[in-house]
Image: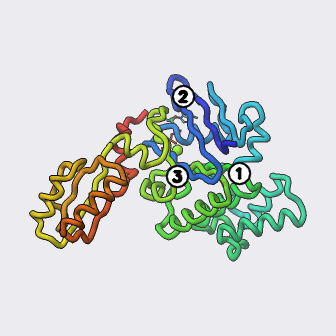
């Protein structure tokens, strides 16, 4: 069953359409990035998924449970980490988690075991006696994630979890997210740090002014926007010989000298590409480096969105 299915949701605030007919799905074990400029409708979409906001139209299904028909059951299956959260400053980490574990109906040994488990998972166990107002931003984000996991939800919706984190904390968060996906949970994550999302996401949804502009695997979206790959090759032979050979190849265009080798656009598939490399070798050109350009989420973002604020 699909872990999270967003089906045609629309939400207006007065005349402003914050979310306009948005649909996408996230499978179990998948990490889905949600990107778009400020005010695009990400938080509103996520809040609707988390039963905190009602859509004007459409519905969201969490493990098949409708957030409109059965919000209580849907809430048991999902964990939501908001972009800002109110904690009680004079409580300790452990008290805070214990409080929420009670709210989720956990009691006795099971409650302590669960709190210990999420403390260990988020590396907060050693700090469990610390007061919340003394925590750094990264520790607070961890605590918020720990709280989100208490009831072992199968779908996690994280609204800008990496905001304000230093590079180490971001890498650690990424590892936590991957570990959650490996536990077969579905994750929907919004972020403005695109390089980070690209590294961990199985797919992305791009939204602007409430409308979904694209969704799917990053490389597939990239292919649609730009049907050729960029390849860069360096060989031990004379540069002229390499350039001439490339120009004679089918599917190759826009050959240009780059970083001591040649970059070019390539429209062939992987097998044709392997054959091309074999031909370069057979012709005695001695290729030593042959690399495809990486798919950049930034490029996708910039070519899809217009930067309109609403
Ligand atoms: N409660 C509300 N009342 C009125 N307008 C709202 C409300 N919540 C959101 N909006 C508007 O809806 C639009 C979408 O906002 P939303 O917070 O979903 O954007 P976002 O993609 O999360 O942006 P950001 O990247 O800045 O977090 C914005 O124009 C915002 O001003
Ligand atoms: Mg937001």
Asked if 301 appears above or below 60 in the picture, the reply is below
Position of residue 279 in the picture relative to residue 204 (left or right)? left
Q: Nearer the viewer, residue 139 or 89?
A: 139
Asked if 235 appears above or below 18 in the picture, the reply is below
Of discs 2 and 3, which sits in the foreground? Answer: 3
Marked residue nearer the N-terminal end (1 or 2): 2
State how far apart marks 1 and 3 are (Cα).
17 Å
Asked if 62 appears above or below 191 in the picture, the reply is above
Q: Which residue is mark 2?
A: 21
Which numbered dot is residue 202?
Answer: 3
Q: Secondary structure at mark 1?
A: loop
Q: Nearer the viewer, residue 18 or 236?
A: 236
User: What residue is at 22 percent from the left and 67 percent from the top?
Assistant: 234
Image coords of residue 235 (percent x, y): 20, 69
User: What residue is at 58 percent from the left and 48 percent from the top?
Assistant: 188
Q: Nearer the viewer, residue 121 or 94?
A: 121
Q: Which residue is mark 1?
A: 154
Q: Secondary structure at mark 3?
A: loop
Looking at this rendering, what residue extends furthest in the right direction? Answer: 108
User: What residue is at 79 percent from the left and 64 percent from the top?
Assistant: 114
């Amino acid at each position: 069953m699909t872990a999270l299915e967003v089906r045609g949701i629309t939400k207006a605030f007065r005349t402003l359409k914050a979310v306009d007919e948005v649909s996408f799905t996230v499978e179990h074990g998948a990490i889905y990035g949600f990107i778009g400029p400020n005010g695009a409708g990400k938080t509103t979409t996520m809040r609707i998924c988390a039963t905190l906001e009602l859509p004007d139209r459409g519905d969201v299904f969490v493990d098949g449970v409708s957030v409109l028909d059965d919000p209580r059951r849907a809430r048991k299956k999902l964990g939501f980490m908001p972009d800002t959260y109110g904690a009680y400053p004079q409580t300790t980490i452990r008290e805070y988690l214990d409080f929420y574990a009670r709210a989720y109906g956990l009691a006795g040994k099971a409650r302590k075991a669960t709190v210990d488990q999420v403390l260990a998972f988020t590396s907060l166990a050693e700090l469990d006696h610390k007061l919340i107002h003394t925590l750094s931003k990264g520790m607070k984000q961890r605590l918020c994630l720990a709280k989100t996991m208490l009831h072992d939800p199968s779908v996690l919706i994280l609204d800008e979890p990496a905001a304000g984190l230093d590079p180490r904390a971001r890498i650690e968060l990424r590892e936590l997210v991957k570990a959650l996906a490996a536990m077969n949970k579905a994750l929907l994550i919004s972020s403005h740090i695109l390089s980070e999302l690209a590294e961990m996401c199985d797919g992305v949804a791009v939204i602007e002014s409430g409308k979904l502009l694209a969704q799917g695997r990053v490389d597939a979206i990239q292919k649609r926007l730009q049907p050729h790959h960029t390849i860069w090759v360096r060989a031990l032979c004379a540069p002229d010989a390499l350039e001439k050979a490339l120009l004679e190849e089918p599917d190759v265009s826009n050959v240009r000298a780059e970083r001591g080798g040649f970059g070019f656009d390539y429209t062939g598939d992987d097998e044709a590409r392997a054959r091309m490399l074999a031909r370069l070798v057979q012709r005695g050109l001695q290729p030593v480096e042959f690399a495809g350009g990486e798919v950049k989420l930034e490029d996708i973002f910039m070519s899809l969105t217009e930067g309109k604020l609403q």
